[in-house]
Image (cartoon, rainbow, N blue to C red):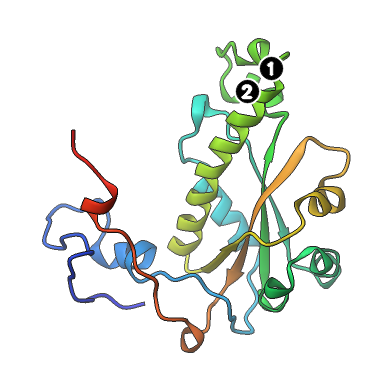
C-alpha cells in the first residue's frame, strides 16, 4: 500500500499536524485499504490471528460487554464444513483465503460480566429480557467486528468481509449447543493487488454528515 494519493473532494485533509498515528498508517488502515477477494498462497499463522484479537479486544463496547466471538476457519477439515454453507459467489474466494473468521456474538455475554463489569446491574436486568440482550449483543459485536478489520490491517493482513452464507447452518455446524450466533464472515490473508476491482465511491462529508 502506498501513500501520496491525490486529495479529492471526497478525501479528508492531509495537512493536519499531530496525527496520533502517521499519515502512512492512515493509508494502511483506511485510505489505501481494500476489500480483497483474491489471495496469495501464503499462510496466516496462529500467533498472528491471536495478535489481531489481542489488539482489537481493547475497543470500547456498551458497558464493556464485549459479546463478539471469533472462530477462525483455517484447516482443510474446517473449510470443508464451511464450504457448503456459503453462497455460490463466495465459495471460491473463501476456500482460497488462508483463514476465514466467523465473527459472531454471544447471547450469554452476561455470564462474563462478573469479570468485565463487576459493578454492573445488567445481569439482573437481562435475565428476563432476551430481546434487549440480543440487541445489545448484535450492536456491540458489530463495533467489535469493525475493530477486528482495522486491527487485522494494522498487523499487515488484508480483509474480505462478507455476508452471503447460511447463518442458521453455520450456527448449527460451528456453534451447536451454545448461545453464540454468527454475524458475518471475514476472509484474511495477503491479497493479490493485481486482482482488485476499481474502488467504489464513498459519500462526501456534506452528503453524510451535519454539524449541529
Return the residue nearer the eye: 17 or 38: 38
Quadrant assignment, res 199:
bottom left
Element type at mark 1:
loop
Q: At 67% across and 24% down in the image, what residue appears?
A: 131
Residue 71 image position (x, y, % from top left): 72, 53
Q: Residue at x 53, y 78 (%)?
A: 191
Per the image, the residue denoted by label 1 is 129
x and y percentages locating residue 31 in the rendered image = 32, 67
In this rendering, the count of numbered labels is 2
Question: Looking at the rendering, in which quadrant would you find the C terminus?
Answer: top left
User: What's the mark number on residue 132?
Assistant: 2
| Circle 1/circle 2 CB separation < 8 Å | yes
Residue 154 placement, left or right of 52: left
Tell me: residue 196, above or below residue 34: below
Any part of residue 55 in sight: no
Identify the secondary structure beneath mark 2. helix
Instruction: Tell me how far mark 1 sits from mark 2, CA to CA.
Output: 6 Å
Query: Neighbour class for label 2 at 10 Å: few (<14), some, many (≥20)?
Result: few
Asked whether 166 or 110 is in front, the reply is: 166
Amino acid at each position: 500500500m502506498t501513500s501520496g494519493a491525490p486529495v479529492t473532494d471526497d478525501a479528508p485533509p492531509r495537512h493536519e499536524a499531530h496525527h496520533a498515528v502517521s499519515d502512512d498508517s492512515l493509508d494502511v488502515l483506511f485510505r489505501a485499504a481494500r476489500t480483497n477477494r483474491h489471495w496469495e498462497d501464503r499462510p496466516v499463522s496462529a500467533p498472528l490471528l491471536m495478535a489481531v484479537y489481542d489488539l482489537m479486544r481493547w475497543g470500547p463496547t456498551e458497558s464493556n460487554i464485549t459479546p463478539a466471538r471469533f472462530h477462525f476457519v483455517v484447516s482443510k477439515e474446517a473449510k470443508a464444513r464451511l464450504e457448503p454453507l456459503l453462497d455460490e459467489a463466495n465459495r471460491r474466494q473463501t476456500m482460497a483465503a488462508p483463514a476465514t473468521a466467523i465473527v459472531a456474538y454471544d447471547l450469554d455475554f452476561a455470564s462474563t460480566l462478573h469479570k468485565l463489569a463487576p459493578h454492573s446491574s445488567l445481569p439482573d436486568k437481562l435475565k428476563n429480557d432476551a430481546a434487549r440482550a440480543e440487541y445489545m449483543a448484535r450492536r456491540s459485536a458489530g463495533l467489535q467486528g469493525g475493530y477486528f478489520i482495522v486491527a487485522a490491517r494494522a498487523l499487515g493482513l488484508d480483509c474480505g468481509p462478507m455476508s452471503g452464507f447460511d447463518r442458521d447452518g453455520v450456527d448449527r455446524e460451528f456453534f451447536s449447543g451454545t448461545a453464540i450466533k454468527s454475524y458475518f464472515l471475514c476472509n484474511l490473508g495477503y491479497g493479490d493487488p493485481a486482482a482488485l476491482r476499481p474502488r467504489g465511491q464513498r459519500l462526501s462529508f456534506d452528503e453524510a454528515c451535519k454539524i449541529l
